[in-house]
């Protein structure tokens, strides 16, 4: 049996990878990172993975003494390439970016290398996220495993301590308040508080996404298409920025990991597209 660990670059996926090696053996553990790609402007990354994510991946790969397979889509270069080519903007209700840059890439790689049987997908969901785990189990059954949901139960602060014992700094993005280390803080499924953090700490990324959203609306010829919603109404990133600039600070939600990228949508399950 091979255990395929989806290593996202966050602390939860690191802990899942470490535990998997410890419990199932290094020879049976396969770490895989699906890169969503990057877009740079004036030498600064404005879309895609955080620059420090690659440093963190290198550090934990060396420390765990286990090779990390880095893979990427052969069809799309980044999330906006996915949106425009599929004429579908990501949102909290649909995530074509995750589907084509994460789920399908990882599934194709796993099947190509190990076939359709005798593999278990390993995810870094926390023991504090029981509800989300039930969602995954309803889809994957016994073909998925959550090592962080087994004793000993640890907090993210304790994972920080474990990393420090190895001389590894945690992902820099967490120091800015972000709960996960995916897509440089930008995610079409993120809540309004994380939108606020992105605007406050990573304005260049915010402005790039705001610009691309307006470009996409013009491309479709529709002004009712947005990534985010507020009070059950569509709201553009430009309108959200105006609210932030006026002093609006959204309510902070409970911290969660970011394994939502790995959960297929209903349509994908119906048509078996992943």
Image (cartoon, rainbow, N blue to C red):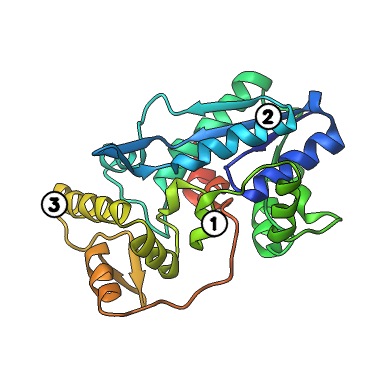
| 149 lies left or right of 200 | right
For the view shown, which residue lies furthest in the top direction?
A: 113
Name above or below for residue 70 compared with residue 60.
above
Q: Are there few (<14), some (14-19), or many (20+) residues within 10 Å of tag 3?
A: few
Quarter occupied by residue 33? top right
Q: Secondary structure at mark 3?
A: helix
- Residue 11 in percent (x, y) is at 64, 49
How far across and down, in percent of the image, does residue 4 sit? 69, 33
Separation of marks 2 and 1 at Cα, in angstroms: 21 Å
Q: Is residue 8 left or right of residue 65?
A: left
Q: Is residue 224 above or below residue 42?
A: below
Quick one: label 2 or label 1, which is nearer the N terminus? Answer: 2
Look at the numbered disc 2 and give the secondary structure of its residue.
helix
Residue shown at 51% from the left, 31% from the top: 105
Front: mark 3 or 2:
2
Give the CA distance from mark 3 to mark 2: 46 Å
Nearest the viewer among 69 and 115 is 69
Residue topped by disc 3: 218
Q: Which residue is mark 1?
A: 174
Task: Give the tally of numbered discs.
Answer: 3
Mark 1 or 3 closer to N-term?
A: 1
Residue 2 found in image quarter: top right
Which residue is nearer to you in this view: 219 or 77?
Answer: 77
* Crowd band around label 1 with a 10 angstrom C-alpha radius: few (<14), some (14–19), many (20+): some
Q: Earlier in the sequence, mark 3 or mark 2?
A: 2
Q: Is residue 230 visible?
A: yes
State the residue at coordinates (29%, 69%): 234
**Mark linked to residue 62:** 2
**Residue in front for this viewpoint, 101 or 31:** 31
Q: Secondary structure at mark 1?
A: helix
Identity of the residue drawn at 77% across and 44% down: 142
Query: Where 36 sits versus 162, above or below?
Result: above
């Amino acid at each position: 049996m091979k255990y395929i660990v989806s290593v996202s670059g966050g602390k939860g996926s690191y802990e899942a990878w470490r535990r998997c090696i410890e419990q199932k053996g290094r020879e049976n553990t396969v770490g895989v990172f699906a890169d969503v790609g990057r877009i740079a402007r004036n030498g600064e990354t404005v879309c895609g993975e955080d620059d420090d994510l690659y440093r963190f991946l290198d550090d934990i790969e060396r420390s765990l003494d286990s090779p990390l397979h880095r893979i990427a889509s052969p069809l799309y270069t980044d999330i906006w390439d996915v949106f425009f080519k599929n004429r579908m903007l990501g949102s909290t209700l649909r995530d074509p970016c995750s589907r084509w840059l994460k789920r399908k890439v990882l599934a194709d790689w796993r099947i190509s290398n190990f076939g359709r049987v005798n593999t278990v997908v390993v995810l870094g969901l926390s023991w504090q996220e029981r509800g989300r785990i039930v969602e995954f189990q309803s889809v994957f059954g016994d073909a998925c495993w959550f090592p962080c949901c087994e004793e000993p139960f640890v907090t993210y602060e304790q994972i920080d301590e474990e990393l420090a014992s190895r001389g590894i700094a945690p992902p820099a993005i967490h120091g800015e308040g972000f709960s996960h280390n995916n897509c440089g803080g930008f995610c079409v499924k993120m809540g309004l508080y994380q939108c606020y953090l992105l605007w406050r700490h990573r304005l260049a990324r915010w402005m790039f996404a705001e610009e691309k959203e307006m470009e996409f609306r013009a491309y479709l010829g529709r002004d009712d298409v947005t990534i985010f919603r507020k009070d059950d109404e569509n709201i553009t990133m430009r309108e959200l920025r105006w609210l932030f600039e006026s002093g609006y600070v959204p309510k902070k939600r409970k911290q969660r990991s970011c394994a939502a990228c790995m959960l297929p949508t209903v349509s994908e399950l119906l048509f078996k597209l992943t």
